[in-house]
Image (cartoon, rainbow, N blue to C red):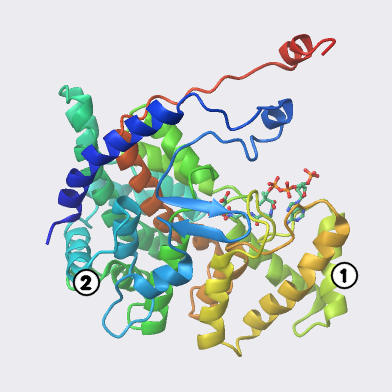
């Protein structure tokens, strides 16, 4: 059976031809007008990027290479005795559009485990970080690494071969993230010495072990689901787009992903998973546990009236409940239906959309992925909410690197859109 790299090597020439043909036939066709509001409005809805790995539909949610989350849960290989998809399979799917065999996935687990060690200087760097430095800042700092791509570039590698060392860097990067994340977790939250990776275990199992939860099969399954659903969300979200943009300057995958992580660390993006837990805890402190619907509603209104957003709700593209929220909700219903925080998350779900709708500003009053992830982690004992976005970051590496590999394989050019000044817009449309 071919390895992932062999499979990619076979697919890339076909895809180069496919893109050429698509551009020859449709290259000069228009998507419609660009209007001035696109420039001022965060480019919402502006067609601007190509990424085949995943596509987001406003009503239906994400599809990874055409497959919904329930389909991925059904078709992707699982660990023996497990019921959640292995993220190794998702990475294969993102890169090739194909569902790998159980053996191919096992080979990928082994390959990542073999690449997992981090350089000593990174260990020292992390050990010297004060625990007060946010885990996400430590995470992006630790990504400094010798890059096969940067080395090959300095030695004059031909453009058509870029994807090979970018693939190797991406594999190294993904493989090393559990050790980096585990070290940060243990340093910051004083959880004892870091154990070593077991080459016989899958990626999520090893990550769980490094965090101290490897003996809890339910937590390991949660990690498999968590990484799968957080991996990618088409090309336009802040982290995926940042990775693509920085990669387009031929910055190596470690630099490009570091930049992506810095975007993920913002409260309107990945940090929202931390913000949700902070907000829920503040609510409990303010109105008590087992509060009435009326008290919760009042609290939501007080958040809005103080000019803050309700974290975990709304989305730039989605207009329905995020299927990633639903996948986590189903996991909770199956495994922790009596958890008191889960009950609060459910109660909030019945109240916030109505309030946001009544407030009349948010285009999407429904919950996104971040509204549900913290309660699951908390249930299993990972209660340090400042760490939650690091786990989102480990997962997002799968999508960002898959995109970097394909961008270099297809010869994607430097990204350089045009910016305008308000004065130039006023001049352009005078008397029109
Ligand atoms: N609570 C309060 N106000 C909101 C919310 C919310 N959850 N969502 C949107 N709005 C407001 C938004 O701030 C804006 O107000 P203003 O006109 O005063 O600037 C208005 O509604 C229109 O915004 P939208 O067009 O609906 O949303 P946009 O595409 O600009 O932003 C988010 C999308 C996700 C940034 C926004 O919904 C939000 O801030 N949500 C809370 C933070 C969050 O959960 N982020 C995580 C998203 C998922 N992820 O992982 O990245
Ligand atoms: C994501 O997963 O990247 C978020 O849902 C944000 C987005 O898609 O814009």
Up/down of 348 relative to 187, above or below = below
Q: 168 or 68: nearer the eye?
A: 68
Q: 171 or 354: nearer the eye?
A: 354
- Residue 223 appears anywhere in the view: no
Q: Point out the image quarter for the C terminus.
A: top right
- Furthest toward the left, the residue is 1
Up/down of 63 relative to 194, above or below = above
Which residue sits at x=65%, y=85%? 340
Nearer the observer: mark 2 or 1; the answer is: 2
Which residue sits at x=69%, y=70%? 280
* Mark toward the start of the polypeptide (2 vs 1): 2
Q: Cβ–Cβ below 8 Å for labels 2 and 1?
A: no
Return the residue at label 2: 102
Which residue sits at x=33%, y=78%? 214
- Residue 100 appears anywhere in the view: yes
Residue 243: % across, % down: 43, 39
Q: Which quarter of the figure has residue 289?
A: bottom right
Residue 266: % across, % down: 58, 47
Residue 11: % across, % down: 23, 45
Of helix, strand and loop, which one carries label 1? helix
Q: Residues within 10 Å of mark 1 (few under 14, many from 20)?
A: some
Residue 206 is labelled as none
Return the residue at label 1: 298
Q: 121 or 25: nearer the eye?
A: 25
Of helix, strand and loop, which one carries label 2? helix
Left-right relation of 139 to 115:
right
């Amino acid at each position: 059976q071919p390895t992932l790299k062999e499979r990619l090597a076979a697919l890339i020439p076909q895809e180069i031809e496919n893109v050429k043909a698509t551009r020859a036939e449709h290259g000069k066709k228009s998507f419609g007008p660009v209007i001035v509001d696109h420039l001022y409005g965060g480019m919402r809805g502006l067609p601007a990027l190509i990424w085949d790995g995943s596509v987001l539909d406003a009503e239906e949610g994400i599809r990874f290479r055409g497959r919904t989350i329930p389909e991925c849960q059904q078709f992707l290989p699982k660990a023996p005795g497990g019921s959640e998809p292995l993220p190794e399979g998702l990475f294969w799917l993102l890169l090739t559009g194909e569902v790998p065999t159980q053996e191919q996935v096992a080979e990928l687990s082994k390959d990542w485990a073999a690449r997992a060690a981090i350089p000593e200087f990174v260990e020292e760097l992390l050990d010297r970080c004060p625990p007060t430095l946010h885990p996400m800042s430590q995470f992006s700092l630790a990504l400094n690494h010798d890059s096969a791509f940067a080395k090959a570039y300095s030695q004059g590698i031909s453009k058509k071969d870029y994807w090979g060392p970018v693939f190797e860097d991406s594999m190294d990067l993904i493989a090393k993230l559990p050790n980096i994340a585990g070290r940060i977790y243990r340093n910051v939250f004083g959880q004892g010495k870091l154990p070593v990776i077991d080459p016989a275990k899958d990626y999520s199992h090893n990550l769980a072990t490094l965090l101290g939860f490897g003996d809890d099969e339910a937590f390991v399954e949660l990690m498999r689901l968590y990484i799968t659903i957080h991996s990618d969300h088409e090309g336009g979200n802040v982290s995926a787009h940042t990775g693509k943009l920085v990669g387009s300057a031929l910055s190596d995958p470690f630099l490009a992903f570091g930049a992506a992580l810095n975007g993920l660390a913002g409260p309107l993006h990945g940090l929202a998973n931390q913000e949700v837990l902070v907000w829920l805890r503040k609510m409990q402190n303010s109105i008590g546990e087992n509060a009435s619907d009326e008290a919760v509603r009042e609290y939501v209104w007080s958040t809005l009236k103080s000019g803050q957003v309700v974290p975990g709700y709304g989305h730039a593209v989605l207009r329905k409940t995020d299927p990633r929220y639903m996948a986590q909700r189903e996991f909770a219903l199956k495994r922790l239906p009596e958890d008191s925080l889960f009950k609060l998350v459910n109660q909030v779900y019945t109240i916030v959309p109505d309030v946001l709708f009544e407030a009349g500003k948010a285009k999407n009053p429904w919950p996104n992925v971040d509204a549900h992830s913290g309660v699951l982690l908390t249930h299993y004992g990972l209660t340090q909410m400042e760490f939650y976005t690091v786990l989102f970051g480990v997962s997002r590496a799968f999508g960002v690197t898959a995109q970097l590999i394909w961008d270099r394989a297809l010869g994607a050019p430097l990204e350089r859109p045009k910016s305008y000044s308000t004065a130039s817009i006023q001049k352009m449309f005078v008397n029109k």
